[in-house]
Image (tube, rainbow, N blue to C red):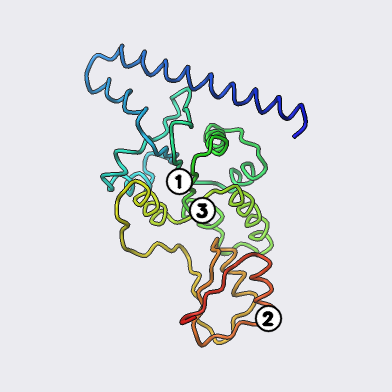
C-alpha cells in the first residue's frame, strides 16, 4: 500500500470511529429525552442488536420470515432511512433483502452512492458478515429468459462481490445460518432457489453453465450420468464442484 492510500485508509477509519461515538451519544441523549419506558427501551435496545436488516419496503417477505424466529427477532434491527447514521461496527451480520441490477453493478464497481450500498460497504470494511437474499436479486428473480451473454456479464459481477466474502443464498439458508450462529437448531425445509440438481444421461457444458448462472457453486449429478470433458473443464474454470451420487 502506497503512502497516499495508507493516509486515506487511516482517515476513513478515523471518520468511522468519530461517527460511531457521535451515534452512541445521540442514542443516550434520545433515551434521556424519552417520555415513556417503552420509548427508552427502543433506543437502548438498538445498541444490543446484532443483525442489521436492509429491506426493500415495508412488505418485505424477509421481515415476516425473520420475525417468525423468536431468537432472531430479538437480535435484528431493521434499517430506517430516517435515521441519520447507522454504526455498522455494532452489528455482526447484515442481511440485504433485495439488490437490483443497477445496485449490483455499482456495488461490484465500488460505487456506493446510496444509503443502502454505503451501509453494505461500511459493513464489509468493519468485518461484518454480509448475507444477500438470492430471491431478492433482480438478475436471478427476473432474468430467466435473458440472453446468456447478459447473464454471464452480471454473473461475473456476482462473483466479484462473492470474492469479498459476501454470502449469497436463499432466505431459508440465511435464516438457518443465523439460527445456528445465535444458538438455535436449524430448521428443515427446501431452501433451494432454482435447481443445481442434474439428472441426465450426458451432462454437457450448458448444463453446468446453467448451474453457474443460477448462482450455485455445486452441481449434484445422478449416479448414472456421464459428464463430458468439456463440462468438466468448464466446472474447473468457474470453480463449480461436481458431486455425483454414491461417490
Q: Position of residue 187 (x, y in %)?
A: 31, 58
Where 35 falls versus 134 (above or below)? above
Are the residues at dot 1 and dot 2 in contact (C-beta closer than 8 Å)? no
Q: Secondary structure at mark 3?
A: strand
Horizontal side of 144 relative to 82 (left or right) equals: right
Left or right, 115 with respect to 37, comes to right
Indicate which label's residue lies in the foreground, 1 or 2.
2
Alpha carbon separation for disc pair 3 and 2: 29 Å
Q: Which residue is mark 1?
A: 97
Q: Position of residue 197 (x, y in %)?
A: 49, 74
Q: Which mark is residue 229?
A: 2
Dividing the picture into quadrants, the one containing residue 106 is top right
Position of the N terminus by quadrant: top right
Name the spot of residue 153 as percent of width and height, x first: 68, 56
Crowd tier of the residue under label 3, counting other residues whose Cα lies within 10 Å: few below 14, some 14–19, many 20 or above:
many
Q: Using a 10 Å C-alpha cutoff, classify the residue at mark 2 as few (fewer than 14 neighbours), some (14 to 19) or many (20 or more).
A: few
Q: Of residues 224 and 6, which is closer to you in this image?
A: 6
Q: Which mark is residue 168?
A: 3
Q: How many marks?
A: 3
**Who is closer to the viewer here, 92 or 152?**
92
Circle nearer the N terminus (1, 2): 1
Where residue 47 appears, x then y in whole percent? Answer: 37, 27
Mark positioned earlier in the residue sequence (3 or 1):
1
Amino acid at each position: 500500500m502506497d503512502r497516499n492510500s495508507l493516509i486515506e485508509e487511516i482517515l476513513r477509519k478515523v471518520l468511522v470511529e468519530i461517527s460511531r461515538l457521535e451515534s452512541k451519544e445521540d442514542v443516550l441523549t434520545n433515551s434521556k429525552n424519552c417520555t415513556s419506558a417503552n420509548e427508552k427501551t427502543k433506543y437502548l435496545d438498538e445498541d444490543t442488536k446484532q443483525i442489521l436488516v436492509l429491506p426493500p419496503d415495508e412488505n418485505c417477505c424477509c421481515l415476516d420470515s425473520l420475525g417468525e424466529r423468536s431468537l432472531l427477532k430479538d437480535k435484528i434491527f431493521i434499517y430506517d432511512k430516517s435515521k441519520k447514521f447507522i454504526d455498522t461496527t455494532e452489528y455482526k451480520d447484515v442481511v440485504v433483502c433485495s439488490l437490483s441490477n443497477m445496485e449490483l453493478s455499482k456495488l461490484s464497481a465500488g460505487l456506493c452512492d446510496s444509503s443502502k450500498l454505503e451501509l453494505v460497504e461500511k459493513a464489509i470494511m468493519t468485518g461484518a458478515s454480509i448475507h444477500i437474499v438470492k430471491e431478492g436479486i433482480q438478475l436471478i428473480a427476473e432474468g430467466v429468459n435473458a440472453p446468456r451473454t447478459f447473464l454471464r456479464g452480471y454473473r461475473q459481477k456476482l462473483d466479484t462481490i462473492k470474492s469479498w466474502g459476501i454470502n449469497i443464498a436463499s432466505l431459508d439458508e440465511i435464516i438457518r445460518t443465523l439460527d445456528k450462529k445465535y444458538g438455535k437448531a436449524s430448521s428443515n425445509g427446501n431452501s433451494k432457489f432454482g435447481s443445481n440438481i442434474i439428472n441426465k444421461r450426458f451432462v454437457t457444458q450448458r448444463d453446468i453453465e446453467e448451474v453457474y448462472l443460477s448462482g450455485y457453486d455445486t452441481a449434484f449429478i445422478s449416479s448414472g450420468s456421464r459428464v463430458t470433458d468439456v463440462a468438466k473443464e468448464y466446472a474447473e474454470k468457474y470453480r463449480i464442484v461436481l458431486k455425483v451420487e454414491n461417490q
